[in-house]
Image: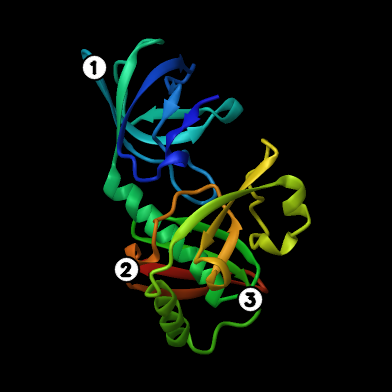
Amino acid sequence: MTELLFRKDAYLREAQGRVKEITAEGGVVLDKCLFYPTSGGQPGDSGELLWEGGRMTIATAVKGAAEDVVLLAAEPANLPEVGQVVQQTIDWDRRHRHMRVHTALHLLSVVIPLPVTGGAISAEKGRLDFDMPEAPQDKAALEDDLNRLIACNMDVTEEWITDTELDAQPDLVKTMSVQPPRGTGMVRLVRIGVGKETADLQPCGGTHVANTDEIGRVRLGKIEKKGRENRRVYLHLD
């Protein structure tokens, strides 16, 4: 199993790793991986690998078998050898924007307290799909509420509970289409705020900013009808 460095420190930008496998498709699997793999609506990280005598531009990362992360090249390139030590560097600006959007979307689910049926993240914007038969009457008020929450400078932290504890608290799960990341017997929760001042607490495997102040001001874009009872709400970084 790959050691997930992004899980230990979402702000780590460079790290070494040793190649433990080259897949049949030419993907690189490391024993310690800095790159977040595509999952939960969040894109995989991009960046590069450097080793003695070689360089590889990484277009994205995807999940492999047994919690491994597979790094995919942007174009055909020479590959490192199994056992070789490589230097990993992620595209930090892109990753950090993903973190800002992701945390903002968690807060969007607070100001619109309805079941979430889908979502997606990019470096410029994100969106959530809600079980929302009728469109909001005052989008500007929702945007103001969201920006007020962001401006509270709340810490964003993680904690872990067992699968059984999560099953006993089904209200923690807001997403109807994406199930919380399971498989190890423990589930990661992301908390925004502290104690009684907690604004949001839900299962999530993605990367987030350490404090909502990093998000900056956001604006709500168009709200699209997606089916009889679904609305898609777009969120943009300013």
In this figure, which residue is indicated by the disc labeled 2?
A: 216
Q: x%, y% of residue 82?
A: 41, 10
Label 1 vs 2, first from the N-terminus:
1
Mark 2, Cα crowd under 10 Å, few <14 / some 14-19 / many 20+, is some
Helix, strand or loop at mark 3: loop
Disc 1, disc 2: CB below 8 Å? no
Mark 3, Cα crowd under 10 Å, few <14 / some 14-19 / many 20+, is many
**Is residue 3 something one can see in this rendering?**
yes
Q: x%, y% of residue 199?
A: 53, 70
Label 3 vs 1, first from the N-terminus:
1
Q: Quadrant of the N terminus?
A: top right
**Is residue 122 something one can see in this rendering?**
no
Distance from the alpha carbon under mark 3 to that under mark 2: 27 Å
Helix, strand or loop at mark 2: loop
Of tags 1 and 2, the one toward the viewer is 2
In the displayed orientation, state which residue is furthest to the left.
53
Of tags 3 and 2, the one toward the viewer is 2
Distance from the alpha carbon under mark 1 to that under mark 2: 38 Å
Q: Residue at x 67, y 73 (%)?
A: 228
Distance from the alpha carbon under mark 3 to that under mark 1: 51 Å
Q: Amino acid at mark 1?
A: Gly
Name the side, left or right, on which 36 lies relative to 84.
right
In this figure, which residue is indicated by the disc labeled 3?
A: 132
Q: Amino acid at mark 3?
A: Met
In this figure, which residue is indicated by the disc labeled 1?
A: 54
Disc 3, disc 2: CB below 8 Å? no
In the displayed orientation, state which residue is furthest to the front.
195
Q: Residue at x 74, y 51 (%)?
A: 165
Q: x%, y% of residue 219?
A: 37, 75
Label 3 vs 2, first from the N-terminus:
3
Q: x%, y% of residue 7?
A: 47, 41
